[in-house]
C-alpha cells in the first residue's frame, strides 16, 4: 500500500521464465522521464506469489537428487535476495 500511495512502480516483473527489469531514467533534456526495460530468461523464475516449497522443489531438490544419485555429481546453489527473505530457510 505504501508503494501505491507514493505511485511507485515495480522495478522487477516475473513472467516465468522471463524476468523484466524496469529502470526509471531521464532523457538528455534532464526533464522528460521514461522507463527502460531489460529482459532476462531463466530456467525458472519466481514471483511474490511463489511459496518456499515452490522455490525448493524447482531449484534445490533436483540438484540434491543428482548429487545423491551416486554418479559423482556436484552442484552449487547461489541464493541471492534481500536480508530476511528466506534464502537459508528455503535451502
Image (cartoon, rainbow, N blue to C red):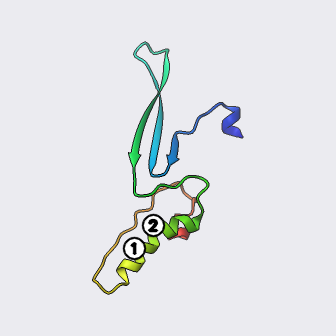
Q: Of helix, strand and loop, which one carries label 2?
A: helix
Residue 29 horizontal/vertical position (percent) = 43, 12
Residue drawn at 68 percent across, 35 percent down: 4
Residue drawn at 47 percent across, 55 percent down: 45
Q: Of helix, strand and loop, which one carries label 1?
A: helix
Q: In this image, 55 relative to 42: left or right?
A: right
Residue 75 horizontal/vertical position (percent) = 34, 72
Q: Is residue 60 above or below residue 38?
A: below
Q: In this image, 87 relative to 6: left or right?
A: left
Q: Which residue is mark 1?
A: 63
Cβ atoms at labels 1 and 2 below 8 Å apart: yes
- Cα–Cα span, label 1 and label 2: 7 Å
Which numbered dot is residue 87? none
Q: Residue furthest left?
A: 72
Q: Is residue 33 above or below residue 75?
A: above
| Residue 54, image quadrant | bottom right
Residue drawn at 48 percent across, 36 percent down: 22
Q: Report the number of discs.
A: 2
* Depth order, front residue of 53/26: 53
| Residue 3, image quadrant | top right
Q: Is residue 20 above or below residue 8?
A: below
Q: Is residue 32 above or below residue 45?
A: above
Residue drawn at 40 percent across, 57 percent down: 43
Q: Residue furthest top?
A: 29
Q: Residue furthest bottom?
A: 70
Q: Which residue is mark 2?
A: 59
Residue 72 horizontal/vertical position (percent) = 27, 82
Q: Quadrant of the N terminus?
A: top right
Q: Residues within 10 Å of mark 1 (few under 14, many from 20)?
A: some
Q: Residues within 10 Å of mark 2 (few under 14, many from 20)?
A: some
Amino acid at each position: 500500500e505504501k508503494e501505491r500511495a507514493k505511485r511507485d512502480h515495480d522495478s522487477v516483473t516475473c513472467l516465468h521464465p522471463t524476468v523484466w527489469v524496469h529502470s526509471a531514467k531521464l532523457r538528455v533534456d534532464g526533464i522528460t522521464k521514461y522507463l527502460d526495460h531489460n529482459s532476462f530468461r531463466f530456467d525458472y523464475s519466481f514471483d511474490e506469489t511463489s511459496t518456499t516449497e515452490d522455490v525448493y522443489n524447482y531449484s534445490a531438490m533436483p540438484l540434491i537428487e543428482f548429487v545423491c544419485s551416486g554418479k559423482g555429481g556436484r552442484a552449487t546453489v547461489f541464493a541471492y535476495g534481500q536480508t530476511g527473505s528466506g534464502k537459508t530457510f528455503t535451502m
